[in-house]
Image (cartoon, grey):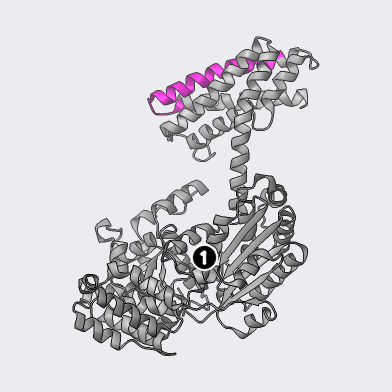
Amino acid sequence: MDPLSATASVIAVLQLSGKVVDYLTDVKDASKERARCAVEACNLYSLLLNLRFRLEEGSAETSWHTAVRALAVENGPLDQFKQALELLQSKMTDGGRLKKAGEALLWKFKKEEVASILDRMERLKLLVEIALQMDHFNLSRAIKDDITPVRAHVDNTEHRNHLEWISPSDYPTQQSDIIKRRQEGTGQWFLDAPEVAKWRSEAGATLFCPGIPGAGKTMVAAIAIDSLLKLIHDTSVGVAYVYCNYKDQKEQDMTSMLAAILKQLVQGRPLLTEPLTRLHKQHAHKGTRPLAEEIFTTLQSVISDLSTVYIVIDALDECRNDDGTRRRLLACIRDLQRKADIRFLATSRFLPDIIDEFKDLGRLEVQASDEDVRRFVAGQVHRLPNCIQRKHELQMLVQDKIAESVDGMFLLARLHTDSLLDKRTPKEIKATLTRLSKGSAALGDAYKDAINRIESQLAGDSDRAKNVLSWITYAQRPLTTAEICCALAVENGEEELDPENVPDVEDLVLVCAGLVVVDEESRVVRLVHYTTQEYLERIRETWNPSAQLDIASTCLTYLSFNDFKNGSCSTDAELEEQLRQSVFLDYAARVSLMRNAGDVNASVQI
């Protein structure tokens, strides 16, 4: 480092220290933390002033000057202290803006923040004192001891920041949610299939796993991913996956899916971060986002350092293709396979254009096996009425009848099982089992039966179920449990949210006849299957015709609450805090903005 740069760094910190000391003396607060910060800042100011004069008077060629210059390296002691001062300044000057005349400076710090700031002051004070003793040997050693853990922490923080910058997606959490719902032992037929063994072992292999709606394709994808993550311990082998979702089609474009794959391959591999770091440097300081082509190039660079990469994409049929996203994504994966050992697995419904993409490649149809259905039903006995739990022969009858009726459709097994929940006698159970639908109309009949069960509940529960299903069906993105509970608590004409009107999410799920589930880790509330969305879209105009207007009214009422009448937030930090405290604000604002903008989809999707 240039000797002048070290002196300039000290001067810059001195100037900032002087301003902060002035602020600290003006703060209208008598706390011990504020007083101690002021005293320590003054002491350090005096030491730094002495150090500045020593630097200016002495020779830049001495070993002492060389050691002192290490104080000013990036993320070194001076830099850390400067960051602490900037934190103090920003909070006491309203985000960096000087207070108006007459406004009081307030102490806004938590004890943990103060402890961190004082710790940085103390470390720098010790180093400066050693420097002023002209002991360059001990100074060099002390600086090294101080910087090494800091650099490791900074590297880890930068790694996490770069990963979040390239993609906010969290498919691993989704994977955890799905695999938790797996009934032990189910899907073993898939793992034992020779087609799967070939896909795992053959370089550049592709396996296409089509299936009818509700066959269990997503669970099969999760089982494949889970087996890879458990069996592969070689750090040179990567695993990445994407769960396509009809509710996320706007977010799941070509760029975001490639970025999600890149993120997963780099995550936990610090030695592979260099290509991502370069990409971040090219864009972050300009506030721009990388194009799909740039992400693809970065992905190629990362993959070149791995021996094998497994890529799993679930529900290709739910990936948007009106703009060519699905076609281009598959083309990119094929391009990667030509240059590296990429083993690709995809699931989908039987759509002609998707089937054509995988012709002449490995194929294994997904069907709910009789054994898997029986395992699933056996695992649900604890939820079923007592008359079933007490009689083994009735349990076996339930397993037999449901396994006979599902015809390869795992979803149907779930819906048929749920249809027994409100039956209380063996006769009612047997009558219901006799009426179970089979064939192509079975799924529609199962949904119709679920709607009938919802409508036969007490009026309050029936209305609540209609509202929950309408909110999810019309949602423009997946809703969290906190968001939907808050939405249902909003009362027209009120100016604030009454905490006593917020429903329990378990009660909401309970009244929806098995059509709604909650992902435990992500806390997203969703319909049990894509076909549920399709069915509800067909009946929603007659079943709950006022739903759209009710949703729009709820969003506008929420935005008119007293909490939001003070205007917009002046800083990003204030906005983040507002969104954290007001869980429904982001969604309500998006809905209202879309309607005000006259979005062409507003009539069918809120």
Q: Is residue 308 left or right of residue 248?
A: right
Q: Residue at x 34, y 71 (%)?
A: 378
Is residue 463 at least partly visible in the picture? yes
Tell me how many marks there are. Answer: 1
> Of 120 and 525, which appears nearest the observer?
525
Q: Secondary structure at mark 1?
A: helix
- The question of residue 47 being in magenta is answered with yes
Task: Say above or below: 435 vs 176.
Answer: below
Task: Where is residue 88? Give x, y as percent.
Answer: 51, 32
> Of 289 and 558, which appears nearest the observer?
289
Q: Residue furthest top?
A: 133
Write the start and end of the magenta stretch as one range: 26-54
Task: Where is residue 26? Give x, y as percent.
Answer: 45, 26
Q: Residue furthest right?
A: 61
Q: Is residue 269 left or right of residue 416?
A: right
Task: Say above or below: 392 vs 179.
Answer: below
Q: Main secondary structure of the magenta part?
A: helix
In the rendered image, the quadrant that contains the C terminus is bottom left
Q: Amino acid at mark 1?
A: Ala
Q: Residue at x 43, y 34 (%)?
A: 109
Q: Is residue 591 left or right of residue 513?
A: right
Task: Where is residue 377? Give x, y as percent.
Answer: 35, 73
> Of 299 and 463, which appears nearest the observer?
299
- The question of residue 477 being in magenta is answered with no
Is residue 546 at least partly visible in the picture? no
Task: Where is residue 8? Give x, y as percent.
Answer: 71, 25
What residue is disc 1 on? 222
Kindly indicate the quadrant of the structure image that contains residue 542. Answer: bottom left
In the rendered image, the quadrant that contains the N terminus is top right
Q: Residue at x 53, y 60 (%)?
A: 226
> Of 65 and 54, which appears nearest the observer?
65
